[in-house]
Amino acid sequence: MNTIAIVGATGLAGEKLVYLLSTLPDSRVKLFGNSAVNTKIRVGKIHTSVESCDKLLSDPPKYAMFMAPEEVAAYYVPKLLKKGVTVIDNSSRFRLRKDVPLIVPCINGQEARGHNLIANPNCSTIQVAICLNALKPLDPTKLTVVTYQAASGAGREGLNDLLEQRSYGRLQSFRHPLNDNIIPCIGELRPDGVTSEERKLTDESRKILRLPRLKVNAFCARVPVTVGHGAFVNVQFKERFDLNTARTLLKNAPNVLLLDDAECGLYPMPLTVRNTKYVGVGRITKDPTANGLNFFCAADNLLRGAAYNAYEILLDKIKENDACL
């Protein structure tokens, strides 16, 4: 029986992961999180208490899945690796390390083989990378992305802020009220004016897709939506391309749901793909100013953009390890 630890089980993405793992056969799920010790969470038919993260080290699991802040991963992950634990980390701590694979299983799942530490990408990066990977046969040279990111991307505090009207005094996560507003800045602002969220999208896309020379122009904004990130994407290609070919490539891509009939009101929206593993893609048109393609994509940032991707990585690692027995 596989023992699987979820660190950060009471967070929004952690709750999704608990649900996914509750039906996994031959597995025992243990829950950890220092801010919620002794909280009881239902895992399948059993109510399980959240334990202190320190117990991870005294009784290490076979697999540990981190849905916790970066500082938690930075402290516990190296210690667990020394104990032979396979770790899947959703924080940004290890994503860009050369010796750590950054995995979206339907794109580069094979790169996780032989590694005990696997990084889960940024939520916006996952949905954009899945779409761009489908278009790789057309030889993309430049990517422009504008994201419209839901409040839940900032956790429960972000959702709480969304419920506030216009009161600055009660905000927990955002600098400005999000209700009836758009905040055009996510993450820490760097000296060059680019935010850390935009930098993640740039660097992580290049690594996942193995396109180190890809030009990326990213801009990230927070919008008053509870769950589900949207993104306007423009992709430029080296050679001339056929629009129907591009649409077919997207339609046939794994985990992509083509929703592309604007005349009938069919296009991807956060509400459309909520609680699914799919990236909705639509409003597919040619860029009239360049040799490029425009489209809009949307995905559930908690499920597709975090928990489900981590879950798929875990399934692959279990198969790999079982095959070695």
Image: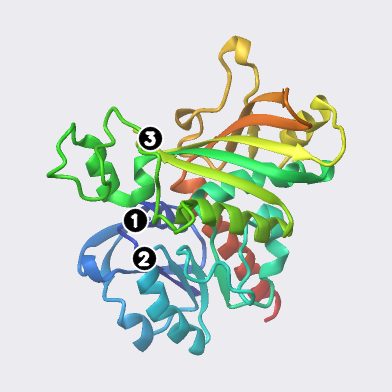
Across and down, in percent, residue 144 comes to 62, 40
Q: Which residue is tagged 2?
A: 69
**Front residue (pair 68, 56):** 68
Mark 1 vs mark 3, foreground winner is: 3
Residue marked by disc 1: 45
Residue at mark 1 to residue at mark 2: CA–CA distance: 28 Å
Identify the disc placed on residue 223: 3
Which amino acid, mark 2? Pro
Cα–Cα gap, marks 2 and 3: 22 Å
Q: Is residue 255 visible?
A: no
The reply to whether the C-beta atoms of the residues labelled 1 and 3 are less than 8 Å apart is no
Mark closer to the chain start, 1 or 3: 1
Q: Determine the secondary structure under disc 3.
A: loop
Mark 2 nearby-residue class (10 Å; few <14, some 14–19, many ≥20): some
Q: Relative to 249, does residue 198 appear above or below in the rendering?
A: below
Q: Sequence order check: which comes first, mark 1 or mark 2? A: 1
- In-image side of 100 versus 170 (left or right): right
Q: Sort mark 1 into few (<14), some (14-19) or many (20+) by Cα contacts within 10 Å.
A: few
Quadrant hosting residue 218? top right
